[in-house]
Image: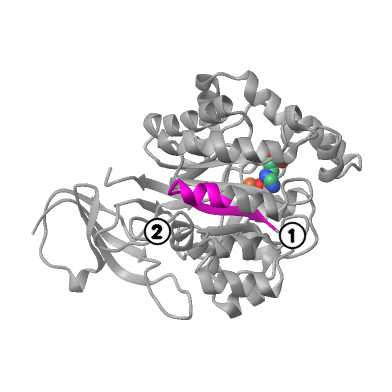
Amino acid sequence: MQCDTLWIDARLATMANVGAVAGVGAIDRGMIAATDGRIVFAGPVADAPFFDAANVVKCDGRWITPGLIDCHTHLVHGGDRSAEFELRLAGASYEEIARAGGGIVSTMEATRAAGEDSLVQSALPRLDALIGEGATTVEVKSGYGLTLAHEIKMLRAARQLGSVRPVGIVTTFLGAHALPPEYRDDPDGYITAVCEQMIPAIASAGLADAVDAFCDGIGFTAAQTRRVFEAATAHGLRVKLHAEQLSNLHGAALAAEFGARSADHLEYLDDDGIHAMAAAGTVATLLPGAYYFVRENRLPPITLLRAAGVPIALATDCNPGTSPLTSLLLTMNMAATLFHMTVDECLTGVTRNAATALGLGHEIGTLEPGKSCDLAIWDIERPAELVYRMGFNPLHARIWRGQ
Ligand code: NIG
Ligand code: FE
């Protein structure tokens, strides 16, 4: 059989096994073959047909995982919030700062002041940090523009990232992230603008792959979130939600009702929310960086999510306010240490389940024939090393769409 590239003498964590117990799908003497950017074989050498390849890459026993996927980021934004970080170190809470006009609104001001190209330039070092650790797909949200023009600028900047770097970019419209000052006394009026102006325009421009909202005491109510979801659905866009981060407004159940791809954060998630998510197949995207950085002490209900069979994804939530984190490796370490997740769960969370959270489970997230050939090749002896170390990057090489 003809193919473009073969990776031989490798150990594979295919992440492809199905069944109740997650596992890395380890293959000890493995190889991968790719043609036109797609995997045509991934498995034991012993089972492989004979391939005639233009390129043969010897991996010297290194481990290959699927390219990592960061399924929840706010990578594009102006400015930073290191001054607010200092206020928090002096005792102020995230919520107090937000209510005093800081928080998301301070990043909104910096983002509105930046041009599209400058947003691309300021996001690139963050994107490069993710790529440098093997990320091959990154979701990027808007939500710091909060007018149609500024939200479009953010989404265009996000899309541009995918043309200046070899990485898959998935965009999410998060107009309902915070109330812009122009609408201080009229939150429902802002939601009307989101639903009647922004969603239709963004959907018809093809700038967003999904619609998200922040359902919380300092965000939007469940009734307002429902309106956003109705508008998104009417325009053919799938939804996801920042839910149950600081309080329980039953956002996860609402998201599940709309067939959300994921509900994210979930520290305050209750039983009803878990069961609604399980029934709808909604992924639980946990964000240990935000949990750590705001010193949250209520854990997401991991044991119950596990028992209910809700797929768990992990993401950086890279954002200037609650998670200035650009490392999926550290995200996995935090999930293991803070959330008591297993190594297999952590690795599944940044590969297979992250792909499902983006609606791309058929394209990426496992090493299987037919999928995009997105690979991370690691200088490690055991997959657990990817979760175990802190601040150490064992990436040897990274392949995106076969290159
Ligand atoms: O995912 N919860 C709302 N959105 C972000 C925080 C954004 C910010 O503080 O700038 C989050 O934690
Ligand atoms: Fe977020």
Q: Amino acid at mark 2?
A: Gly
Foreground residue among 93 and 368 = 93
Q: Earlier in the sequence, mark 2 or mark 1?
A: 1
Can see residue 132? no
Which element type, helix, strand or loop, lies under badge 2?
loop
* Residue 130 versus residue 243 in the image, above or below: above
Residue 230 drawn in magenta: yes
Rendered image quadrant of residue 183: top right
* Residue 6 versus residue 17 in the image, above or below: above
Residue found at x 78% / y 63%: 298
Residue numbers of the magenta segment: 229-243
Q: Residues within 10 Å of mark 2 (few under 14, many from 20)?
A: many
Rendered image quadrant of residue 62: bottom left
Residue 245 screen position, x and y as percent: 72, 55
Can see residue 237? yes
Q: Is residue 302 left or right of residue 278?
A: right
Residue furthest right in the image = 91
Residue found at x 42% / y 80%: 19
Q: Amino acid at mark 1?
A: Leu
Q: Is mark 1 within 8 Å of ligand 1?
A: no
- Please identify, in this view, whether the residue under mark 2 or under mark 1 is nearer the observer: 1
Which residue was labeled with disc 1? 249
Q: Is residue 101 left or right of residue 308?
A: right
Q: Is residue 324 left or right of residue 156?
A: right
Quadrant holding the C terminus: top left
Quadrant holding the N terminus: bottom left
Rendered image quadrant of residue 163: top left
Which residue was labeled with disc 2? 365
Residue found at x 50% / y 69%: 281
Q: Is mark 2 within 8 Å of ligand 2?
A: no
Q: Residues within 10 Å of mark 1 (few under 14, many from 20)?
A: many
* Residue 264 versus residue 170 in the image, above or below: below
